[in-house]
Amino acid sequence: MASSTQDIIPQLQLANTFGALLIGVILAAVLFGVTNVQAFIYFQTHSKTGLTFYKLVVVWLWILDALHLALIVHSIYFYLVINFANIGALTEIVWSSKLQSVVGVLIISGEHFLYVHRIWIVNNGRSRALPIMVGIAVALTSGLAIAIVWREYQFHVIMDAIDIEWALYIYFGAVAFVDVLIASSLCYLLATSRTGFSRTDLVITKLMDYILNTGCLTSMCSMIAVITYIAMPNDYIYEAVEFLLLKLYVNSYIALLNAGYYVQVNADTMVSSELHMRHGIHRPRPHIRSIARQGTPGITQEHVSTSR
């Protein structure tokens, strides 16, 4: 029995399978800590606005993020602690592993639809072709994700996942495409919303930088998952990358909700410094909340604080 066990262990390549999952869980926990910081900053900077739709969104994302972390921790605990030295258990698919896929679909699809909603709002007064096109792409990607999860719930052992390899390739590629499509759509709408006022245009430029950076980051992570899955189909490195991808989605969205506040503060500082250098006098800078009440020509505070 001991001899057969020793023969099986090298074939499992634990370093690239469950070892990769363990590292992915650790890094995911670190990113969850960043999520907590982002959520804290958001509620601190919006403490006097009452209960709003985006506050509920932040709470919802935080709950899903925490639930996902708990599920992947239980999954790795099941394999490496509860079934320590039980080789047979390593081929089973534990319930928490299946459920974390459901939570992952809720996070990615939910955030994509939130961005479609934002595109619809920013697109106000223009042709609805762009938000409709993005919405269709998001709906098709979400439908594929639901089909994959439904199929995964019928699996009992890890080897059964071979049947849906092609679907996973398409899904991760579609997620990367949708991320690029959303980022480019929002950048286009913001670029065409320039007003000629230096302060407003500076805010728009900063928001476009945030959108491009976060969109490229999640797209690259999706493509890395595809590449690692194709190159190393017998390893679990791609799944560890998927853990990080979900955390990056939550972090990037809440960070962009916070971006409007910090971008506007930076814009006010730069404009104030420019006036001081030009006129040689000091003018007290209005508090950011008073600016928010007054509004900004060409782009509202809501657009600044919630656009991707």
Image (cartoon, rainbow, N blue to C red):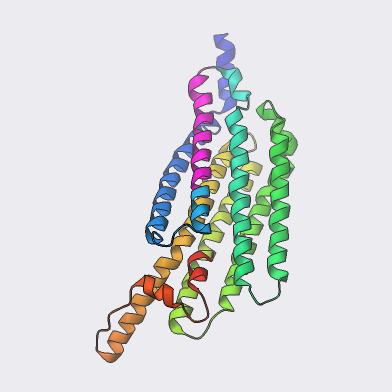
**Visible in this render: residue 251?**
yes
Residue 105, percent across and down? Answer: 63, 45
- Placement of 298 over or under 11, stated as above or below: below
Residue 238, percent across and down? Answer: 59, 41
Residue 123 image-quadrant placement: bottom right
- Placement of 240 over or under 200, stated as above or below: above
Q: Residue at x 61, y 69 (%)?
A: 121
Q: Where is the C terminus found, in terms of image quarters?
A: bottom right
Residue 242, percent across and down? Answer: 57, 44
Residue 86 image-quadrant placement: top right
- Placement of 114 over or under 30, stated as above or below: below
Residue 13, percent across and down? Answer: 56, 28
Q: Residue at x 63, y 24 (%)?
A: 92
- Placement of 90 over or under 177, stated as above or below: above
Residue at the front extreme?
50
Q: Which residues are magenta?
A: 61-85
Q: Is residue 80 magenta?
A: yes
Q: Residue at x 62, y 67 (%)?
A: 119
Q: Where is the N terminus found, in terms of image quarters?
A: top right
Q: Residue at x 48, y 37 (%)?
A: 25
